[in-house]
Image: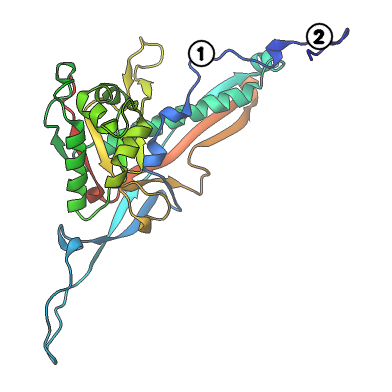
Amino acid sequence: MIYQNTVAAPREELSDLITEGATNADQFVGLRILPPAPSKQLTLHVPKITIAQGDLMRATGKKRTPGANFDRRQGAIGDLTATLQQVGEEVLLPDEITLTYEDYFAVEAFYAKDASDRLLRSHEMDVAATVFNTGNFTAKNSLTAYTQANIATMSPVEDILAAIRVVKGLGEAPNTLVIPGIVYDRIRVCTDMRNFVAGSVNPGARVTGNTIQMAFESHGIKNVLIPDAYVNQSELGANANINSIWGTAYIGVLNCQPGQLLAGGIGRTFYWEKEGPLFNIQSYRDEPKKSNVIRALKSTLPSITNSRAGTLIGTQYA
């Protein structure tokens, strides 16, 4: 029944708010690739066991005669040293604005959410730059360039299977594919991927992130992440310069693990726990300006702790 009252009239504007470009958090995947890990210090030192390439997969097999010496090897322990970087900004909310619009929506709550979204986007950029980096992971170009002209001949399935083998050959078990949204749009309609996902078993199946994951599940892939966020990289007040955060250059085949570092995976997002949560939203009063201030900051460092736990496919996208 529609609310009726001769004195109090419903005012829809008090329960609704027009927001241009409302953020969809699903477009961000950075915390699933490099999950958060707290640090008590701004400069952290974490013990790191170093194992030469290939030694991780050695098996004890030398036969020993009674009284003979055992073969010996010596462990090597180093450390990971990293300094967290602090970034942040503030939003000034003059009383005149807050008092004018507080009957329509929670002004501070909205701008706190907006500030949090900006931190999340910043973190996504940090993770993309860290993961899609040939200084951190090996990379091999696709067999055929991922171009529109090669829709019928490109072979992303073979590229992904070969990359999975590369990571397994390094002693790791990849469980995650990271396919940038623009690249996903290209490979999901190519003949190779459509045949692999549908085939003779699932004729008519649509190629989606879920069906790609199911198709590669027997190869250990549990997550297919399709980051699709954009960022305006222009200076404040200048013309917009909007770009895809994850670009088109690579597909990542990775082992991503949450929790303690002993759980493995390619790495973590270290953050300074003494300061507060990963994305820290604060507020304070600036009385000379008769304003409340929303402060958003993060002291973080997305870090690759095991470069053998992943590899990159160069898409040659054009």
Secondary element type, mark 1: loop
Give me the residue at 15% from left, 57% from top.
53
Q: Is residue 304 above or below residue 63?
A: above
Q: In this view, does 49 lie above or below 288?
A: below
**Mark 1 and mark 2: Cα distance apart in space:** 28 Å
Residue 9's tag is 2
Q: Quadrant of the N terminus?
A: top right
Measured as percent of width and height from the top left, residue 114 is found at 52, 24
Q: Around disc 2, counting alpha carbons within 10 Å, would you say few (fewer than 14), some (14 to 19), or many (20 or more)?
A: few
Secondary element type, mark 2: loop
Q: In this view, does 187 lie above or below 30?
A: above
The kind of residue tagged 1 is Glu
Q: Is residue 35 above or below residue 192?
A: below
Asked if residue 85 can be seen in this view, the reply is no
Give me the residue at 15% from left, 59% from top.
54
Mark 1, residue position? 20
Measured as percent of width and height from the top left, residue 302 is found at 35, 42
Q: Around disc 1, counting alpha carbons within 10 Å, would you say few (fewer than 14), some (14 to 19), or many (20 or more)?
A: few
The kind of residue tagged 2 is Ala
- Which residue is outermost to the bottom? 67
On screen, residue 111 versus residue 176, left or right, reads: right
